[in-house]
């Protein structure tokens, strides 16, 4: 069991969740319970599942949680593509969003491999 707040990937995922909240603020009003809500929830799920995995006693359970977080990051990227294609935010905002997600996925994958070997 470890303190999730000390993990660089958790910090990056938390920052992404905050960023997601900011870039979805100006979504159309009718998206409050649609794509905006889905993006916000999924962005929170990533650091939340990392935190949950850090509370598990067995490394295999942490590895599983990290893989779940990778799945959430893929889902969130699709939601971002959809939002970009619907012109809910700019290409520049999407590029930053997508870049942050790619970095988090790489970090999750690396940590998952490291935990599996330990």
Image: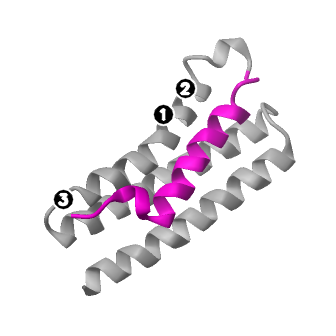
Q: Is residue 85 above or below residue 118?
A: above
Q: Nearer the viewer, residue 84 or 40?
A: 40
Question: Earlier along the polypeptide chain: callout 1 or callout 3?
Answer: 1
Check whether the beta carbons of the residues at disc 1 and disc 2 lie within 8 A of each other.
Answer: yes
Q: Is residue 27 above or below residue 56?
A: above
| Mark 1 neighbour class, 10 Å CA radius: few under 14, some 14 to 19, many 20 or more | some
Q: Which residue is mark 2?
A: 37
Q: Which residue is mark 3?
A: 56
- The quarter of the picture where residue 55 lies is bottom left
Residue 79 seen from this side: yes
Of helix, strand and loop, which one carries label 2? helix
Range covered by the magenta-colored residues: 1-27
- Image x and y of residue 79, in percent: 61, 41
Q: Which residue is mark 1?
A: 41
Residue 64 falls left or right of residue 45: left
Q: Nearer the viewer, residue 31 or 6?
A: 6
The disc placed on residue 23 is: none
Secondary structure of the magenta portion, mostly?
Answer: helix
Q: Residue furthest top?
A: 29
Of helix, strand and loop, which one carries label 3? loop
- Measured in 3D between alpha carbons, the distance from the residue under mark 3 to the one under mark 2, in whole angstroms, is 29 Å
Residue 60 falls left or right of residue 100: left
Specify the quadrant that holds the N terminus.
Answer: bottom left
Which residue: 51% across, 71% down? 107
Residue 14 belongs to magenta span:
yes
Which residue: 68% across, 39% down? 82
- Image x and y of residue 20, in percent: 64, 39
Q: Is residue 81 above or below residue 101?
A: above
């Amino acid at each position: 069991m470890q303190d999730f707040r000390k993990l660089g990937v958790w910090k990056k995922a938390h920052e992404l969740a905050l960023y997601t909240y900011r870039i979805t603020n100006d979504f159309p009003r009718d998206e409050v319970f649609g794509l905006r809500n889905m993006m916000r929830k999924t962005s929170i799920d990533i650091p939340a599942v990392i935190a949950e995995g850090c509370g598990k006693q067995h490394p295999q359970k942490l590895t599983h949680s990290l893989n779940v977080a990778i799945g959430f990051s893929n889902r969130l990227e699709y939601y971002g593509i959809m939002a970009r294609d619907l012109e809910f935010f700019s290409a520049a905002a999407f590029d930053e969003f997508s870049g942050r997600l790619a970095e988090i996925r790489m970090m999750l994958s690396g940590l998952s491999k490291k935990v599996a070997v330990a």
